[in-house]
Amino acid sequence: MASWGKLTFAQKKCVSATGKLMQGTGMVQHGARIGIAASGGVDSFLMLKVLTIRQAIMPFPVELMVLHINAGFDTTSHAPLTDWCARHGLSLHTEITDYGPRAHSEENRKNSPCFYCSMLRRKRLFELCRDYGLTHLAFGHNADDNVVTFFMNILHNGRADGLSANEPFFDGRLQVIRPTMMLDKNTVIKAARQWELPVWKNTCPSNGRTKRDEVHDWLRLAWQNDKRIKNNIFNAILRQQVHLTCQKL
């Protein structure tokens, strides 16, 4: 039996669907050095766990490094991630910032707190990838995130765009990847619980009160009485985004 033991149905789905997307979009290559953006939430922690398994399965060597940017609401919240990475022999960079409080202050008058904080964290992650010589930056967005982003872009920006599974940045020096984009949120939560991942609570004061939350609630109303509607929306948007990703390769 493999070192990760026997997998449940949800866990197998996470590992196999991630592998399928990675292979289909040419996500990583021999010698890739992957920075894993780990917020401590269920999505990024699940991706971290799955990538450690995929690393052992891949027919070529890749390196993993965990990157955590603490937004500053709780400067000790990432302790479970530190312990988990130490137990699993993973390199980890943690950094405590004031991005969250700044995003909710007078400094940020034009943008939503989530947009401003996310922008600051992503900029810092890009800098860390440069400093550590990483070739890839992995985000734990799932299928629900893809659908919500698609409809947010339609409603607020007039664009029919979701999330890219594999996208080059800085003239191709860095690839931003989303390995778990084929997984629905329910599967992610179920598998994370079965793996007993030490996910911690999001203490941001805007948590649950964002425009993304509003769009997600609106979509839930649309499909609450017919599961087929949800499946059709998810599959249509996923196929479009994967197709667009493959066209760019």
Image (spheres, grey):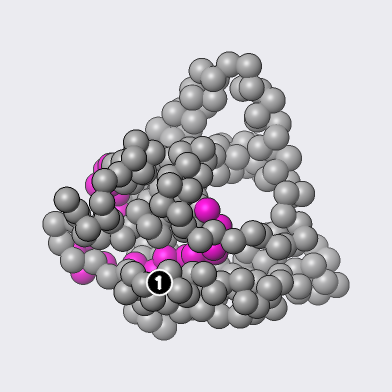
Does 24 appear in magenta?
yes
Q: Name, please, the residue furthest toward the left.
A: 59
Question: Is 54 located above or below residue 237 in the figure?
Answer: below
- Where residue 201 appears, as percent x and y from the top left, is 64, 59
Residue type at the position of mark 1: Cys
Q: Name, please, the residue furthest toward the right.
A: 106
| Picture residue at 65% right of the left edge, 30% below the top | 219
- Where residue 16 appears, as percent x and y from the top left, is 29, 42
- Residue 166 visible here: no
Tell me the element at label 1: helix
**Number of residues whose C-alpha sits closer than 10 Å to that of mark 1, classed few (under 14), some (14–19) or many (20 or more):** some
Is residue 114 left or right of 44 when viewed as pictured? right
- Name the residue tied to disc 1: 85
Question: Is 133 located above or below residue 155 in the figure?
Answer: below
Q: What are the residue bounds of the magenta stretch?
A: 19-42
| Picture residue at 54% right of the left edge, 74% below the top | 79
- Where residue 32 appears, as percent x and y from the top left, is 26, 67
| Picture residue at 59% right of the left edge, 61% below the top | 200
Number of marks in the rendered image: 1
Q: Name, please, the residue furthest toward the bottom.
A: 131
Is residue 111 left or right of 10 when viewed as pictured? right
- In front of the other: 168 or 136: 136
| Picture residue at 80% right of the left edge, 67% below the top | 104
Question: Is 209 located above or below residue 229 in the figure?
Answer: below
- Where residue 121 appears, as percent x and y from the top left, is 59, 70
- Residue 195 visible here: yes
- In front of the other: 46 or 155: 46
